[in-house]
């Protein structure tokens, strides 16, 4: 459930991208011009940026250059969206640090595949088959979870809950955010249901005397405890 920032000034294309990425389970933020894009990166902290080449105010390649010039944004992967025939632009884009490019017009399935591929390469905890946090591993393909040397048996809800928390260790997720990501937008679930499932997750993960990797943040929500080092 990575967050994608779509920087594209053509509204129809932006909507199409948002809709399709949302359907594939991505969180999507949008920005329509170059100035706004740099602010949006600061605010939204995206995991990946889809960057149109031709934008009002500041060009895509200039945005890419600026992202690469700052420590906080240097590692955010960028996929450039270029028009057909702009071969030179592509080379310049890659020169300025873009991770990949897609030529318009493109199919949504191609684009989603590229986004996943770049994320797998650059953000393995979010998009890879296996996520790791200290001595805990979660395998998305086989749905197996291990802590140190033992198998942890989780129900499907607890599995998704742990998956969400492991995507951003340290980040505090509110109960509403967890409801949204684990149960989905359309389902009506009481907010305290989250507490019940976090309780079950803890019970499955922790043996007596072991450190609890999940931190309850009073009146805010839950996070993976960054001080957790295993056992
Ligand atoms: Ca454009």
Image: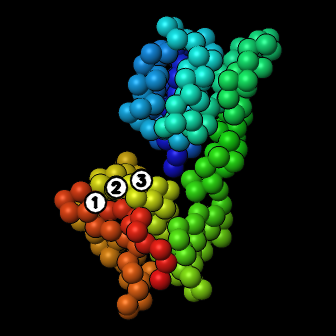
Q: Are marks 3 and 2 in contact (CB under 8 Å)?
A: yes
Q: Which residue is the site of mark 1?
A: 221
Compared to residue 70, the image places residue 212 above or below, namely below
Q: On the image, numbered disc 3 is attached to which residue?
A: 181
Image coordinates of residue 119 in percent, x first then y, are 63, 45
Q: CA distance from mark 3 to mark 1?
A: 14 Å
- Please name the colour scheme applied to the rendered image: rainbow
Disc 1, ligand 1: is the CB inside 8 Å?
no
Q: Which residue is mark 2?
A: 173
**Dot 3 alpha-carbon crowd within 10 angstroms: few under 14, some 14 to 19, many 20 or more:** some
Estimate the spatial distance between the alpha carbons at disc 2 and disc 1, rounded to whole Å. 5 Å
Q: Could you say which quadrant of the image residue 89 lies in?
A: top right
Q: Can you tell which quarter of the image residue 55 is in?
A: top right
Residue 59 vs 213, above or below: the answer is above
x then y, percent, for residue 26: 52, 43
Give the camera-side residue of 30 and 217.
217
Q: Secondary structure at mark 3?
A: helix
Q: Is residue 38 above or below residue 171?
A: above
Q: Are marks 2 and 1 in contact (CB under 8 Å)?
A: yes
Query: What is the secondary structure assignment of the residue under circle 1?
Result: strand
């Amino acid at each position: 459930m990575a967050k994608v920032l779509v920087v594209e000034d053509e509204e129809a294309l932006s909507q199409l991208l948002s809709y399709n990425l949302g359907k594939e389970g991505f969180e999507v933020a949008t920005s329509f011009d170059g100035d706004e894009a740099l602010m949006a990166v600061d605010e939204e902290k995206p995991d990946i940026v889809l960057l149109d080449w031709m934008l009002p105010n500041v060009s895509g390649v200039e945005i890419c250059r600026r992202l690469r010039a700052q420590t906080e944004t240097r590692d955010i992967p960028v996929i450039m969206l270029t028009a057909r025939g702009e071969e030179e632009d592509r080379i310049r884009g890659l020169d300025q640090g873009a991770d990949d490019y897609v030529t318009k017009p493109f199919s949504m399935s191609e684009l989603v595949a590229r986004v996943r591929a770049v994320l797998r390469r650059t953000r393995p905890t979010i998009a890879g088959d296996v996520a790791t946090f200290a001595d805990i591993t979660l395998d998305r393909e086989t749905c197996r979870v291990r802590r140190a040397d033992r198998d942890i048996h989780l129900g499907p809800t607890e599995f998704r809950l742990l998956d969400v928390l492991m995507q951003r260790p340290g980040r505090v997720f509110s109960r509403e955010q967890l409801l949204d990501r684990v149960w989905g937008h359309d389902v009506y679930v009481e907010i305290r249901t989250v507490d019940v499932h976090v309780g079950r997750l803890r019970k499955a993960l922790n043996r007596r005397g072991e450190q609890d990797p999940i931190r309850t943040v009073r009146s805010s929500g839950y996070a993976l405890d960054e001080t957790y080092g295993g056992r």
